[in-house]
Amino acid sequence: MRELLMATVLALSPVQAGSEVKVYFSKGFGVPGKVVAVSRTAPHRGVARFAVEQLIAGPTAAERRRGLHSELSRQIRGKSDCGADFTLKIRKGTATLRFCRTVWGNGVGGDARILHGIARTLKQFGTVKKVVTLDKDGRCLFDQTGTGTSCITGRE
């Protein structure tokens, strides 16, 4: 009976494999900069995870020729502490993205563009109202306040 219930829930879920998602890449080098959406087709129901994976992978050659770029993929380095590039949890309207590898800063402008692209990519989903982006140590990504909690508390 439980298997039947789970199969019914999965069949009726609004997001199915093959769903179109948007990935927001930077165009230009403003702060936080302009982002442009491109479409990708998710091969599984983990559409938010897939969208972040695509953001890390970066734009295609054709998209790069249109001037789109992602600084994120070049800034992820080192060994993972979770077996992947990141973990993603969406709960009570907040998407918490924690990188499991080191993400190097790229200066104020580059850091702002990275965070802006992540936020726009995740906020496309109706269940996401706020995005918290954490580094490998659980501190707010690129937070220079000393506490490492500005993205959680909203205080700079």
Image (tube, rainbow, N blue to C red):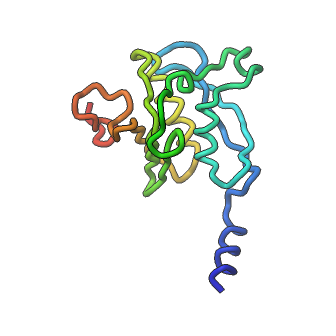
Residue ID at (50%, 41%) = 86
Residue 155 shown left or right of residue 60 in the figure? left
- For the point 63% across and 52% down, the residue is 46
Q: Which residue extends farthest left?
A: 146
Residue 107 picture location, percent across and down: 41, 15
- Compared to residue 2, the image places residue 91 above or below, namely above
Q: Quadrant of residue 53?
A: top right
Residue in the picture at 47% in, 52% down: 89
Q: Position of residue 23 (x, y in %)?
A: 63, 34
Which residue lies at the image location 69% right of the left edge and 31% below the top edge?
38
Compared to residue 74, the image places residue 136 above or below, namely: below
Quadrant containing the N terminus is bottom right
> Which quadrant of the view contains residue 45?
bottom right
- Left/right placement of residue 144 relative to residue 91 reads left
The picture places residue 94, in percent across and down from the top left corner, at 43, 50
- In the rendering, at what x and y percent does residue 32 appear? 47, 21
- Image quadrant holding the C terminus, namely top left
Above-or-below relation of 83 to 14: above
Relative depth, front residue between 14 and 138: 138
**Relative height, residue 8 to residue 23 (above, below):** below
